[in-house]
Amino acid sequence: MPGVAGENTQADKEALQRRWIAQALGESHRSLSLFVTGSQAGGAQGALYYRIGLKGIEVAISQDGLRACLLGMPAEEAIEEVTELLRGHGLQEIRIEQGDETSPVWIEVSRGQAPVPARATRLAFCQPGQLEQVLEAAELHKISVDLLHLLLPDAVDRGRLEESHALAALPGQVVGRFAVEEPGAPGQDVFGRPLHPPLTLAQSQVYPGPGIVSVPPGEWQTEGYGYLCMVENQLSVVSPIHLPADELHAYWVVLDRQPHAVSAEMILQCLQDQGVVAGIAEERIGQLANLVRRGTCKRGMYIVAQGTSPDPGQEAQLEILAKSSSKGRSLVAFAEAVQPDQMVARRTPYKPGTPGRDVKGRPVLPPADTSHRVKAGKGVRVERDGEVECFIATAAGTLKLANDELSVSSTPLLSIDKDVGLTTGNLQFQGDVSVAGSVQRGFSVKATGDILIGGQVEEGCVVATRGSISIGGGVLGRRTKVVAQGSVQALFVEDATMAAGRNILVERVNRGRLRAGNRVMISGRGEEAGTVVGGQVWALRRIDLSVAGSPEGALTSLAVGTNMAVGVTEEQAEKLDRMQRFLEQSSRQMAQLLERIGISRIDPVQIRSLLQAASEQRRKVLLHYTRQLGRLAQLHQQVLNELQIIEEQINKVGELEIRVRDRIYPGVNIRLGSHQINLEEVHRAVRFRVVGGELREEDL
């Protein structure tokens, strides 16, 4: 029976398989990453595997669940501990032996048994439990596509939910009948779960997936409560339980308005299958089950388990007691002139929060303390009143906060109590500058000290200084540049260029170009806080953000080390890219020339022998090729030597890291030093580092 293709059905099937593997491991499907194996996998290269990190080890499990491997052989004394860890995650028949690896980085630890297909003459679907109600494959596919597009995303579209419909199935209901010619034989995956034999029909194979069991003489029955789903010729039962990304709630999604004999025990089993053990609302489940049995339960999402959110605690608070020009948290701030022995600021310390607990019983840590210590600089001393730090002026002058240091400054201060625009003209000042408003389109602010701008920086503006810059609003426009030898802080960057000798701190970036001589931190508390969509972000040591790219595939580049290394400018970074491209191209050309000459590598002795044995006409051709090869090899080596020198400079920077707290979408280019990768699938809660000369992706 040929399948009826639905939109993105291959991706839908992959998502179902991912959840099936994750359920057996007792982990979230979001912690699994799909990859295609290379030569390291021995005879399995080109296969699809899921990779997951488990307490210091990495495990790869084939998409069909028939093979599990370790990525790296553990030390002999750790084999027993690793074996117990794998058993604790559901793997069966574990075998780890030193010296028995497929390759040094790919060790098979468990292998399942593939089912033997059964031969059948026909397969007819029916409404769950109603043999007389024929269910056409095309109709089943359409319902299934709608179901998966509703339930598979991290967030359920509640508006779409009201219009959706699915086929509810109860345990033991018949959903398909077929006539058997050859019975086949069941198999078993690496977790010991049965794999029922697929049916070989006249034109295709149809598979019983999760939640479907084969029952003689020729029936497919449902194993548990859920929604019937047909995708890519595989029939499954999809759980009615939805877990959002934070797993602080579990929802029962009701999509079938017909009365069904659903019991509270069925829902409890569904929760157990999803690993939900905490905060289960048994009384509410019983009430909802009664409504479903009567057919009076509306379509919707109903909370059936609820975790406990962490108490975030209280951030450290710095209160400027003198009249300040800044609003809220600011990298740079100025205040009115102060006098000796005047208390100018108070800082209450961070009060740590308490962990919560998700519906799987795991602790949910409160947000980390992101507050910075404030140092007492020139003209300021610190006294303590219990846990509170009191900052006292020891000299007269302008109170200044810059780079987490509070000082009394004698540097001249230019204060503008409005926008920089037609009434002020461009500003250029030897000292600090404080602007209460915005920098209007096309105007500039340049200084030798620190700059504070209360509003935003508009299209075509230039803000530049030898010190640091703090901007209360956003930075907008392709022709806009904000440049500081110190650090830069702003609310957001859109299309603009921002460069800092030290750190850049913003809440979000949209098609911006950021360069920092130390770190780029993209975070905040808004709905879009921590996001980078499009553009390029470079840092010398580290980039820290929440979301990179977009579902639409916005081209986004995150680079650490290469473009901001000491002595490597943005223009030189482009040169590095050209050098890499030349090396790739010259390698291909040399391989072609070697093939034309008839040798596998550059060997002067072998070339000389070929020339001596060749006819006069052939010798001329060989000489032409060998001269080309010699010139190309010389250029290749020169560029390679130059590249190695630059990479040695880059590596002196120290450890490089890109940390993504939530997710990265396809279309994002990751680069650390000379290593890079273009992402082709969603990655979640990861960090990228270079370890042992290789680019590594690690779970956070």
Image (cartoon, rainbow, N blue to C red):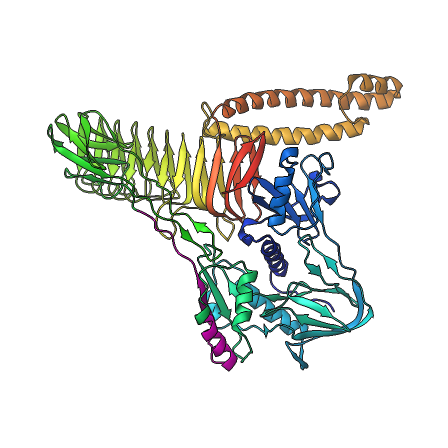
Q: Can the viewer see residue 638?
A: yes
Considering the image in quadrants, where does the N terminus appear? bottom right
Splitting the image into 4 quarters, where does residue 269 fall? bottom right
Q: Residue 277: x, y in percent? A: 50, 59
Q: Is residue 594 magenta?
A: no
Measured from the top left, where is residue 245 in percent x and y? 47, 55
Determine the residue positioned at 54% across, 32% down.
690
Instruction: Please state if 341 lies on the left or on the right of 636 as rendered.
Output: left
Residue 4 seen anywhere in this rendered image of the structure: no
Residue 87 placement, left or right of 548: right
Question: What residue span does the magenta drawing correspond to?
Answer: 284-313
Relative height, residue 433 to residue 252 (above, below): above
Judging depth in this view, the residue of 412 and 78 nearest the camera is 78
Residue 186 x/y as whole percent: 75, 61
Name the residue at 56% across, 78% down: 261
Question: Which residue occupies the foreground of this view, 485 or 132?
Answer: 132
Instruction: Name the one closer to the observer, 535 or 151.
Output: 151
**Which image quarter: residue 121?**
bottom right
Instruction: Count numbered badges in the picture.
Output: 0
The percent position of residue 544, horizontal first and vertical second, equals 43, 40
Judge whether 196 appears above or below 484 on screen: below
Q: Give the vertical position of 466 relative to 36 (above or below).
A: above
In this rendered view, identify the residue nearer to me: 339 or 597.
339
